Amino acid sequence: MINKTVKNAQEALQGVQDGMTFMLGGFGLCGIPENTIQELLRLGVKDVTCISNNAGVDDFGIGLLLQKRQVKKMIASYVGENAEFERQLLSGELEVELIPQGTLAERIRAGGAGIPAFFTPAGYGTEVGEGKESREFNGKMYLMETWLKADFAFVKAWKGDTAGNLIYKGTARNFNPMMAAAGKITVAEVEELVPAGELDPNMIHTPGIYVQRIFQGEKYEKRIEQRTVRTV
């Protein structure tokens, strides 16, 4: 069995260049590839297109790449808690494609499944549908949406093995699995890396066939975007 382990983020990101398209997994601040983002900052790659559900916050996650002006275009479903993302969007400094969340998820899934286009009712009759092909099915109008793929997909999992099989925990399972299938090169960082054969096959969410490089991350902050506590 092929051992896909690399030492660290620096080795995992070999081949990353300016102008590429990246997918970055996670939902809010949950399940984001923290070590990978730090390495992208260190490399200083620029003019990149980032596909992500959102862009983190100003001082964490993709927000750090936005602060350094490394991102040319964001493809996301919402701005979230990132004031810098909002400022760059409104000022015209950043090219932004906002997509309904379900459509974004399906476009990524389609990229991984090799489906170049599909029809969805989401966004028909709104600005989302401007310039897109529409068609009627069973008396209802649908928009044609195209797949999304990336040069690199960066995902974060809870556990992984040396063959690249991955298990996600909780909310981290929202976007990471579909992105793992939609990258030409998929890099997985994991909290715990084990030898091949130690993971229960019935628990694996991403088969190793989709992953080209895997490494064990470190020093995860795991921030909470909006901490809510109950008053007693």
Image: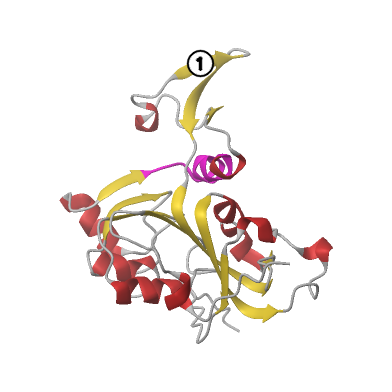
Compared across the picture, whether 69 is left or right of 182 comes to left
Q: Is residue 121 above or below residue 155?
A: above
Which secondary structure class fits the magenta region best?
A: helix
Frontmost residue, 142 versus 109? 109
Frontmost residue, 102 versus 71? 71
Tell me where residue 201 appears, x and y as whole percent: 82, 64
Number of marks in picture: 1
Residue 47 in sight: yes
Frontmost residue, 103 versus 194? 194
Q: How is the image coloured?
A: secondary structure
Q: Residue at x 53, y 45 (%)?
A: 108
Residue 35 in sight: no
Q: Which quarter of the image is occupied by the N terminus?
A: bottom right
Q: Residue at x 50, y 32 (%)?
A: 122
Read off the magenta span. Answer: 98-110
Q: Residue at x 52, y 32 (%)?
A: 116
Mark 1 belongs to which amino acid?
Arg
Frontmost residue, 158 versus 221? 158
Q: Is residue 204 above or below residue 178?
A: below
Q: Which quarter of the image is occupied by the C terminus?
A: bottom right
Is residue 134 part of the magenta span, yes or no?
Answer: no
Tell me where residue 95 appears, x and y as whole percent: 25, 48
